[in-house]
Amino acid sequence: MNPLHNKDVDMGRRTIVKAAAASATAAATSGLVPGLQSVVHAQGSDRPEKTEVRIGFIPLTDCASVVMASVLGFDKKYGIKIIPTKEASWAGVRDKLVSGELDAAHVLYGLVYGVHLGIGGPKKDMAVLMTLNQNGQAITLSKKLAEKGAVDGASLAKLMAAEKREYTFAQTFPTGTHAMWLYYWLGAHGINPMTDAKVITVPPPQMVANMRVGNMDGYCVGEPWNHRAIIDGIGITASTTQDIWKDHPEKVLGTTNDFVTKYPNTARAVVMAILEAGRWIDAGLQNKMKMAETIAEKSYVNTSVDAINQRILGRYQNGLGRTWDDPNHMKFFNDGAATYPYLSDGMWFLTQHRRWGLLKTDPDYLGLAKAINKTALYKEAAAQLKISVPKSDLRSSKMIDGVVWDGSSPAKYAASFKVKAA
């Protein structure tokens, strides 16, 4: 996509990042980052086994590091060509990963775990190569609910108790992140998504259109489809997902275990290219604006730039006159904290699958996370880029309801919630 010069120039990584950041304005018109040359990284045994890598993505703001790795030519540095492939639904991404039509994908964390366990679709051994981003999703309620006073979790619960009817909420995939954020948020306010509401599955780009015609009362999805509902005057932001879990994991770079086994050098090269892209995005305002302009294009997210660029800078509004600056907005790098595939992050999704009855018994939480999250491969890539990695594969986080998750006693944690599946 990008006419970068094919010269073997050994530039320091810091120089490349600085050149990229300093020239973002020029890149906006030229489509390339001056000074970023193709670097022959892979020689001998490190050479990528497969040079063209098809990576699926859904039209969401958090596909940005995959797209920018291709657009800015970071992939070429590592001897590969990333081919971003736009997909219509998460079910489609799942099926193409399983069949091998896609080599990897920008994909929901919980979808990868669900496929590995055979819930929510076919069973196949899967792999998480890295986390693509933290934060930046939201829960949207319809303007009609807001007009009746439901503007956050507490007021929604009050309205649902007072006005008895079937309330419909949408998520994007049964085992995915948005389903888990929605369920956790509802549960934290005493609403059981399994018994007190109807939950439907809708692909992200179709959320706004479905709310416009009254198919749902609320939904959880990634940006820009929450801000788009505000722009279009049909919905309000009731909660951000970073309010549910600060610095939560969101999309991952997912693939099959077969792909990692067969093409380990390729997998590492892809991680390195996307790490560089994430670092470039987070490096400054100009880069984020350039990213917004790029992914807003029809071939990617297909929306207006203004639907993307405010929230990636942490500038939020709820659609009812309230505005705020959120320091915990979507991060693609965050000094490496946003990209590390913590085992405790993967285990958390399993605890919620158990909580909501998607898993009928407790799995081997830690064993599964160790099998799926390729921390060793990530550390190899990070070391070559001089990116620090955490000392532990587990981290501690406090949720919206005050409950702390630290990766210890997952079965006990999963069983501890008052609001859960019967």
Image (tube, helix red, strand yellow):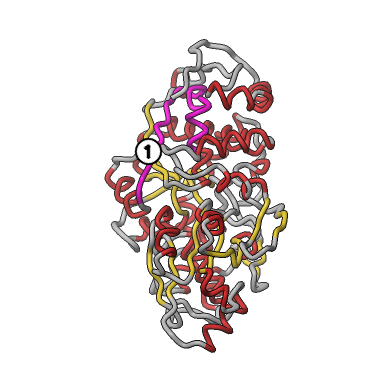
Q: Residues within 10 Å of mark 1 (few under 14, many from 20)?
A: some
Above or below residue 252? Residue 262 is: above
86 relative position to 46: left or right:
left
| Viewer-side residue, 202 vs 165 | 165
Residue drawn at x 63%, y 33% is 287
Residue drawn at x 52%, y 54% is 228
Q: Is residue 304 magenta?
A: no
| Viewer-side residue, 213 vs 12 | 213
Q: Amino acid at mark 1?
A: Thr
| Viewer-side residue, 164 vs 282 | 164
Residue drawn at x 59%, y 35% is 382
Above or below residue 190? Residue 252 is: above
Q: In which quadrant will I find the C terminus?
A: bottom left
Q: Position of residue 119 (x, y in %)?
A: 34, 63
The image shows a total of numbered marks equal to: 1
What element does badge 1 sit on? strand
Q: Is residue 81 magenta?
A: yes
Residue drawn at x 64%, y 57% is 395
**Camera sees residue 50:** yes
Q: Position of residue 392 (x, y in %)?
A: 64, 51
Identify the magenta region: 66-88
The residue carrying mark 1 is 85
Above or below residue 315? Residue 271 is: above
364 relative position to 325: left or right:
left
**Camera sees residue 279:** no
Q: Quadrant of residue 44?
A: top left
Above or below residue 33? Residue 149 is: below
Q: Position of residue 46 (x, y in %)?
A: 46, 24
Q: In which quadrant will I find the N terminus?
A: top left
